[in-house]
Amino acid sequence: MRERLKAIRDAAAPLAQASREAAARPVPGLVASLRAWRGQSEAPTPARRGIAVVAITRHGIALAGRVVAALPGAQLYCPEKFKAEAEAAAPGAAHTYVGKVGDQVPALFAAFDGIVAIVSLGAVVRLIAPHLKSKEVDPAVVVLDEGGKFAIPILSGHLGGANALAGHLATAIGAQAVLTTASDSRGTIGVDILGRELGWTTEATHDELVRCSAAVVNDEPVALVQEAGSKDWWTNHANGRKGPKPTNVSEFSRLEDVAPDTFAAVLWISQREMPEVYKARLAGRSVTYRPPQDKTGETNQ
């Protein structure tokens, strides 16, 4: 047993160091991705905190050590029979449980902002299915294969930050992030997360977000009106945007310059109240973004 534990430590050491170096350059907004749009502060709350890494096999625990090293504050959970291996892979961050992994899901859902499961994707789907509530409250869930080749966000990709978490893991441990949300896979605007990295808040119903998102990804004409906030919203877009802005999105500096009937959706970045005439004409197909303001009322970002 001692030789096995030493082998685990020796094998994990260079990988963990590389992961720590990568984690020292965190993906912007990762913490915000997991909390900001749920009304939580940057600091962990008593209700939820950080990320849980779940592994159920010896090989999975070795990988979990790298994941914990890449995510400061993350905690490893595994079966009691692998306690020694877990403590070797993630010193000071290892926890064990007795019984089935499925029995731990309710507590993990309640306690953590995000969960990284080194378990087969199908098994994770079955384990979490009975506990799903809504995208506004469910934690981010990312599945990793035991080989550390693929990071697959399967729950709360946008609002919960699973896509951002998968991207961070991809950078830190050399995995491939498998993003299936249309806006991320196509590199266009994520309507529900636009400006999140800059601290913007959103005013829209669920149906308005869905309708405007559909307009963007289906290449329908969309107006983006920016009257406030940072102009760097594209380069600071959650999950990264490197290419040109989408060609179906036309930019304006004033809402009054927009002819509402010519656009399928309007994305409005402003600090003022929408004029009544526009409220009526844009009902059901607009999203309002509010950049943060300082104490004097000036827009910060």
Image (spheres, rainbow, N blue to C red):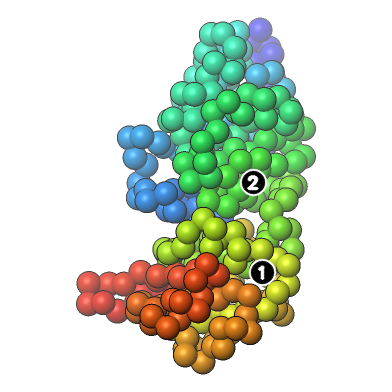
Mark positioned earlier in the residue sequence (1 or 2) = 2
Residue occupying image coordinates x 45% and y 70% = 288
Residue occupying image coordinates x 51% and y 92% = 257
Q: Which quadrant of the figure has residue 234?
A: bottom right
Residue 30 position in % (x across, y down): 51, 52
Q: Are marks 1 and 2 in contact (CB under 8 Å)?
A: no
Asked if residue 175 can be seen in this view, the reply is yes
Residue occupying image coordinates x 27% and y 72% = 294
Determine the CA span between mark 1 and mark 2: 23 Å
Q: Amino acid at mark 1?
A: Val
Residue lying furthest left: 296
Determine whether the residue tagged by mark 2 lies in a helix, strand or loop.
helix
**Which residue is under mark 1?**
216
Residue 118 position in % (x across, y down): 67, 29
Q: Which quadrant of the figure has residue 127?
A: top right
> Which one is nearer the viewer's eye here, 283 or 92?
283
Q: With respect to residue 10, does 44 lie above or below?
A: below
Q: Which mark is residue 60?
A: none
Side (left or right) of 122 relative to 133: right
Q: Which mark is residue 166?
A: 2
Quadrant the C terminus occupies: bottom left
> Which one is nearer the viewer's eye here, 118 or 261?
261
Quadrant the N terminus occupies: top right
Q: Few, some or many C-alpha atoms within 10 Å of disc 2 (few <14, some 14-19, many ≥20)?
A: many
Q: Amino acid at mark 2?
A: Ala
Determine whether the residue tagged by mark 1 lies in a helix, strand or loop.
helix
Residue occupying image coordinates x 63% and y 84% = 262
Asked if residue 19 can be seen in this view, the reply is no
Side (left or right) of 301 relative to 282: left
Nearest to the eye among marks 1 and 2: give it.
1
